[in-house]
Image (tube, helix red, strand yellow):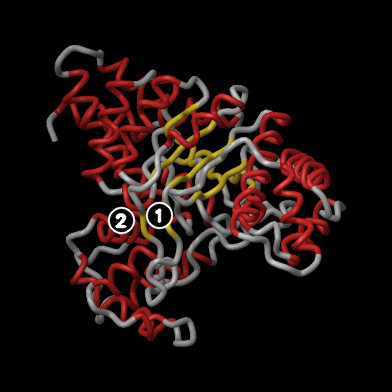
Amino acid sequence: MNDLERRLLGEILSIRAVDCHSHVPPESPHARSLWDLLGYHYYTELAHSAGMPAEAVDARRSEDERIGEMVARLETLDNTVQHSWLMEAARELFGFRAERLTAENWPDLARAVAEAARLEGRYRAVLAKANLEKVFLTNRFDEDLAPVDRTVFVPCLRADDLVFNMADADVRRRLAARTGVDVASTGDVRQAAHELMRHFVQHGGASAAIGLPPDFEPRAPDESAAGRALAHALKGRGPAPDEAGALAAFVFDVLAAACREFRRPFQLMIGAIRNIYPAGVPGGRDLLSKQGSLAAYADLFRRYPQVDFTVSVLSMAWAHELATFAWIFPNVKPSGHWWYTNIPAHIEYDLRGRLEALPKVKLIGYYSDMYKVEFGLPKFNMYRRILARILAREFVAPGRLTESQAVDVAGLLLRENPKRIFGV
């Protein structure tokens, strides 16, 4: 790292960032045991891919047994960026000084994690160390939002169950319990979506979000077909495949309309094929696909110009396509580097292209996708280092931006753009 990169990184590290997507559980946001760190799906799935039986980390085994299994496998993945996240978190948040986590020293780290977990305001201290001002949650549609600490956490309506499982009686029962609307018609779906979004907004909800398979098409809905699917569901019969697709497209469209009504963005996370490897460890069974195209979303973006769609894609094959859509559509905002693209080589390639091609006011730089707040620090620091390197080498050194201007760009990506787009 040269002096220019070092200066820029120092400035970028001082920017208090906004994390617009995580899976942090609001009732237990920080790690209470070492397993809360080693059990992160990145580690269990990589260890399994390197030969560890999935049964080794079965939840029916004791935490110490699972930790021991994982520690024994860390050497097989110590070349990965994920391993570097673990060690940076251990050093910076728990004072762990050994170069590696081993069978001999892991109890020391386990004690440090357990002791830190008992400290008052622990999750706030961890987020302050990571220099994160706000962290978005991923909330079930019927989750109790009242206990959420809104000084640091931002509720977000996760819509997958609503869109893909509306024919399920239990989903409709839960929806009725939350909204007071018994869903028996397409009109009831609209009313329930309105009540649900109103509830989330009243509790500080900043957006809706959904994970979409690569073959999903958010077409203009066929309300008649959606109504038939609901009618069949009410009679206890599963809808035919074409009717199920029509119902999903209809519910998705209703939620987009609710986002428009309540002036909230819709976070679209596109490209995951679920449960493609059923024998994998929990969290390690889904993969990406290069099939499909964002062209299927063009009509959606045209129909809802008032809604900001913050879009993440899983495949690098889709990354350039996302940049071109953001190039053309005012309401399409590229967001973060999701899941399988969340490694430095992919981030650097994609981020450089976005910075060179798109208006800086449209870019949401990064989100953690973390399950415990401890991973915010190493993951955001990884991104900050990449951002400093690109700005230094590609923008400041050639004279395209001054150092001050480069720092301003970093501030937009990490803080100002997500605050403005999501209204937090």
**Residue 200, quarter of the rendered image:** top right
Instruction: Classify mark 1: residues with Cα within 10 Å, few (<14), some (14-19) or many (20+).
Output: many
Is residue 93 shown above or below 308? below
On the picture, is 244 further left or further right than 261?
Answer: left
**Residue shown at 49% from the left, 20% from the top:** 330
Which amino acid lies under the numbered mark 2 shown in the image of this protein?
Trp
Q: How far across and how far down the image is residue 367, in percent? A: 43, 43
Asked if residue 111 can be seen in this view, the reply is: no
* Looking at the image, residue 65 lies above or below residue 96: below
Give the answer, above or below, for where 258 lies relative to 161.
above
* 335 to 58, vertically: above or below: above
Question: Horizontal and vertical percent for residue 38?
Answer: 37, 69
The answer to whether residue 328 is visible is: yes
Camera-side residue of 120 and 79 = 79
Residue that mark 1 sits on: 375
Instruction: Tell me which residue sits at (40%, 54%) in the image.
Output: 375
Give the quarter of the figure containing the N terminus.
top left
Quarter of the picture containing the C terminus is top right
Q: Please state the horizontal and vertical placement of residue 12, each as a whole percent of the image.
A: 33, 31
